Image (cartoon, grey):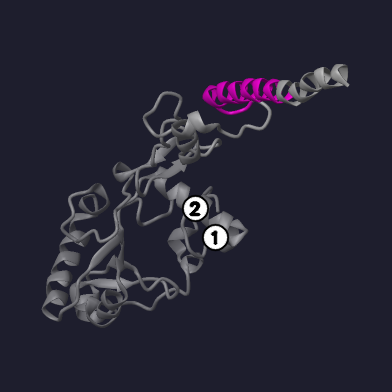
Amino acid sequence: MNGSRGARPATRRAPRAVAAGLLVVLAAAVAVLGLRSLAGPSPLTGSPGAGSTATAATLSAVPPDAAPAAGSPGAAPPPADPPPGVLPRDGRTIDEADGLLPGGATVDDERPGVAALDPALLEALRRAAAAAADDGVTFSVTSGWRSAQYQEQLLREAVAEHGTAEEAARWVATPETSAHVSGEAVDVGPTDAMSWLSQHGAAHGLCQVYGNEPWHYELRPEAIGEGCPEMYDDPTQDPRMQVAGAHR
């Protein structure tokens, strides 16, 4: 009896020792987890720990595939915008020196597209524009004098648009035959200006030459007293376009 009573305290103390051991293990686990938390995102899951809040916020604000900001190291330079209204041609450009005009160019424009027109044509055009202004109509010059290079470029574009050189010739002359290249033709807009010229152009010696081009006018001084001559349906009927050796 006495021996059995003496063994009982040892049996009772065993659960306490086990509990103490469990507490030590638990504390160690908590410490390890705390260290991992302070270390930031887990390399396995990528999820941020409690100590990486600022890092997580920064990463969420910038998508991983976002391009570098403009001007920052490694950012590609912005693409250069091509000059407005410039036509590419075989490694060079067609520009104002070739007669290219911006939208809204007036009869008083000093660019070559207007200024290089035949002086008599330009004078008649300006007189007509002044008279039209009294009627509330404003002229714009959409095209006037053109260099041979510009005319050739327009012809190439017309062939590409209409499919054949024969069809393109109804709209665009060759550099050798074009009245634009010689400075003897002007294209006028907008529609109300074309309409005004169709009614009053002859009084200023300005005549529409081709039925399919209501914008194309040339100087015919005799029209002031006799009226404008009969129009050609299109440039292919104009004898001036039939030049030996001219390509279509």
Q: Percent x, y for residue 61?
A: 46, 40
Seen in the picture, residue 22 relative to 118 is either above or below; the reply is above
Residue 27 included in the magenta stretch of the image: yes
Which secondary structure, mark 1? helix
Q: Earlier in the sequence, mark 1 or mark 2?
A: 2
Q: Residue furthest front?
A: 1
Q: Percent x, y for residue 226?
A: 24, 80
Crowd band around label 2 with a 10 angstrom C-alpha radius: few (<14), some (14–19), many (20+): many
Find disc 2 in the rendering and name its residue: 155
Q: Percent x, y for residue 171?
A: 48, 63
Give the residue drawn at x 70%, y 20%. 21
Q: Nearer the viewer, residue 131 or 233?
A: 131
Find disc 1 in the rendering and name its residue: 168
Give the residue drawn at x 32%, y 76%. 191
Q: Percent x, y for residue 197?
A: 26, 76
Kindly check if marks 1 and 2 are in contact, taking CB atoms under 8 A apart as contact: yes
Q: Nearer the viewer, residue 3 or 101?
A: 3
Q: Amino acid at mark 2?
A: Leu
6 horizontally vs 43: left or right:
right
Give the residue drawn at x 58%, y 54%. 160
Residue 147 included in the magenta stretch of the image: no
Q: Nearer the viewer, residue 101 or 122?
A: 101
Crowd band around label 1 with a 10 angstrom C-alpha radius: few (<14), some (14–19), many (20+): many
Q: Which residues are magenta?
A: 18-42
Give the residue drawn at x 17%, y 70%. 129
